[in-house]
Structures are given as structure tokens and as C-alpha cells.
Image (spheres, helix red, strand yellow):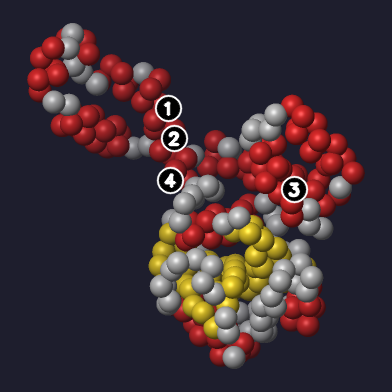
């Protein structure tokens, strides 16, 4: 079950503690009466809890500390050093304490998981892909039947994305869901390649200013973009880039 589209931003703000008292009371009252929004908020809380798990953090290597110290020493002007007290000239004591630990922990989190709030559309796509896996919200409608998935989007979005079945080509259909991308609700059609998940996001062509035929990689994930029939398609997965290109061509042929 999905929540109210006009409440999604408020749910994020409530989770982050960004609402004032009046709006907090209002959205909390809404959650008690709306099952869809309550489930959506529970999924957001699950994502927040998982990305905050210390097990996701990686220990920063000693070489990182050495590199940071070297960079600080190299960027500090000599004339400023001359006028500073002796104990301020060395970054060692500062980095040896809590400040370095905090810096290392922050960098470790950046290494561990992709950022969930980023500026570029590619980063947002990867973040949406990761959220769907972490929050156990891969599909709103789970079926390999295209005749169920395709009409499920009717009335939920203002265009009809193609939903071909690609099991014969090695990419079985898993289902579909609604996602949130760059301020708008978008359909995500889900396929698999062996044990790997492929999220295919579909939007009206021209929504984002990106050149046609993008094939790139972000945070260890492959992305492929193409346009067809007035629509723009973005496929995201952790499979080999060559396999994602195979998916692109199989989908494009079946949908044409």
C-alpha cells in the first residue's frame, strides 16, 4: 500500500525532525488514520536505521590520516605559520583526538553507502535503487505478469510506461512500484538478472537535461539511459555494465 503523494515530503521532514510543532502534530495525527502513510513512514524509519548501523561503516585506513595531515601541511601558508603559537603549527595533536575520529567516521560512511540526498539525477537514481533494497520496498505490485503490472500504474501516474516480459532474454519481470525522483512521482519497473535486481525508472522525455545514450557508473552501480516513444528510461543495477546494456537492448526491442 502506498501513502498520500502530497504527504511524502512531510514524512521525510518528520523523520529528520524538521517540522515545527503544529505540523508535527498534524502529520502524526494523519499517520494514525492513514495506513498507507504509516507504512511509508515505517519504511523510511527502516532505511534510516539501517544506514545508521555501525556495521555499515568501514574503518578508515592509516594512510588516510597521513594523507590528510600532508594536505593540511601543504596548504597552510608559511607566513601564517610564523605568526602562530607553536602548539598551533602541528595538526598532529588535533587529528589524534576526537576530531580525527569524527572525520574518519564521516568518510567511512561515505565509503559504506551511496549518499541518499544528492544533486545529480544519476546519484538520485542510485539512491532510489539502494533504498528499494534496504527498505524491503522493491515492489508495490509483485508479479511476473505484465498484464497485471502495466494496468496497475493507470491512474497513479499521467503516462503509461511499457512493461514487456523479458524472461526469455534472461531478465524476468518482478513487479513495479511508485518511487520519488527529483520532486515527482515516477514508476519503477523491476527485473532480475540471476540474483541481481534491475530498477528501470521511466519519466517523460526531456524531464532531465542529460544527453541520449548515457552509460555510466556511480558508487559501484551501473546506469544506462535511453529514450523512446516520448519517454526516458533509466536502468540501474549492480550487474556488469555489459549485462545492463543487454537488458537495454532487450527491453527496447520488446517495447517497440
> Quick check: 23 left or right of 111?
right
Q: Nearer the viewer, mark 1 or mark 3?
A: 3
Find numbered disc 3 in the image and state the secondary structure of the residue it sits on.
helix
- Count of picture labels: 4
Q: Is mark 4 on a helix, strand or loop?
A: helix
The mark found on residue 7 in the picture is 3
User: Badge 3 local density, few (<14 within 10 Å), some, or many (20+)?
Assistant: some
Which callout, 2 or 3, points at the residue further toward the start of the chain?
Answer: 3
Q: What element carries label 1?
A: helix
Could you tell me residue 93's position as x and y percent?
28, 16
Numbered tag placed on residue 102 in the rendering? 1
User: Does label 1 or label 3 sit earlier along the sequence?
Assistant: 3
Disc 2 and disc 1 in contact, CB within 8 angstroms: yes
Above/below status of 35 relative to 69: below
Q: Which residue bears the numbered disc 4?
A: 111
Near mark 4 (Cα within 10 A), the count class, few <14, some 14-19 or many ≥20, is some
Q: Distance between the residues labelled 4 and 2?
A: 9 Å
Residues at discs 4 and 2 in contact (Cβ within 8 Å): no
Residue projecting furthest to the right: 33
Q: Which residue is drawn at 77% across and 29% down?
A: 22
Distance of label 2 from label 3 (alpha carbons): 31 Å
The quarter holding residue 202 reads bottom right
Amino acid at each position: 500500500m502506498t501513502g498520500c503523494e502530497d504527504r511524502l515530503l512531510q514524512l521525510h521532514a518528520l523523520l529528520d525532525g524538521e517540522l515545527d510543532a503544529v505540523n508535527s502534530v498534524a502529520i502524526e495525527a494523519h499517520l494514525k488514520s492513514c495506513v498507507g502513510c504509516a507504512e511509508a513512514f515505517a519504511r523510511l524509519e527502516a532505511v534510516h536505521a539501517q544506514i545508521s548501523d555501525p556495521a555499515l561503516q568501514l574503518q578508515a585506513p592509516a594512510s588516510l590520516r597521513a594523507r590528510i595531515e600532508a594536505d593540511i601541511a601543504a596548504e597552510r601558508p608559511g607566513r601564517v605559520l610564523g605568526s602562530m603559537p607553536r602548539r598551533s603549527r602541528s595538526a598532529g595533536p588535533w587529528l589524534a583526538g576526537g576530531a580525527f575520529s569524527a572525520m574518519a567516521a564521516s568518510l567511512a560512511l561515505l565509503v559504506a553507502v551511496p549518499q541518499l540526498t544528492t544533486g545529480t539525477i544519476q546519484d538520485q537514481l542510485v539512491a532510489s535503487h539502494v533504498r528499494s533494497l534496504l527498505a524491503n520496498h522493491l515492489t508495490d505490485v509483485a508479479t511476473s505478469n505484465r498484464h497485471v503490472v502495466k494496468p496497475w500504474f493507470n491512474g497513479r501516474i499521467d503516462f503509461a510506461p511499457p512493461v514487456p516480459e523479458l524472461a526469455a532474454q534472461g531478465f524476468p519481470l518482478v513487479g513495479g512500484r511508485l518511487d520519488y525522483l527529483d520532486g515527482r512521482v515516477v514508476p519503477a519497473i523491476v527485473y532480475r538478472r540471476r540474483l541481481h535486481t534491475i530498477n528501470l525508472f521511466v519519466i517523460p522525455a526531456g524531464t532531465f537535461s542529460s544527453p541520449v545514450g548515457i552509460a555510466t557508473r556511480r558508487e559501484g552501480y551501473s546506469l544506462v539511459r535511453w529514450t523512446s516513444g516520448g519517454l526516458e528510461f533509466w536502468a540501474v543495477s549492480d550487474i556488469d555494465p555489459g549485462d545492463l546494456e543487454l537488458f537495454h537492448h532487450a527491453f527496447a526491442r520488446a517495447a517497440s
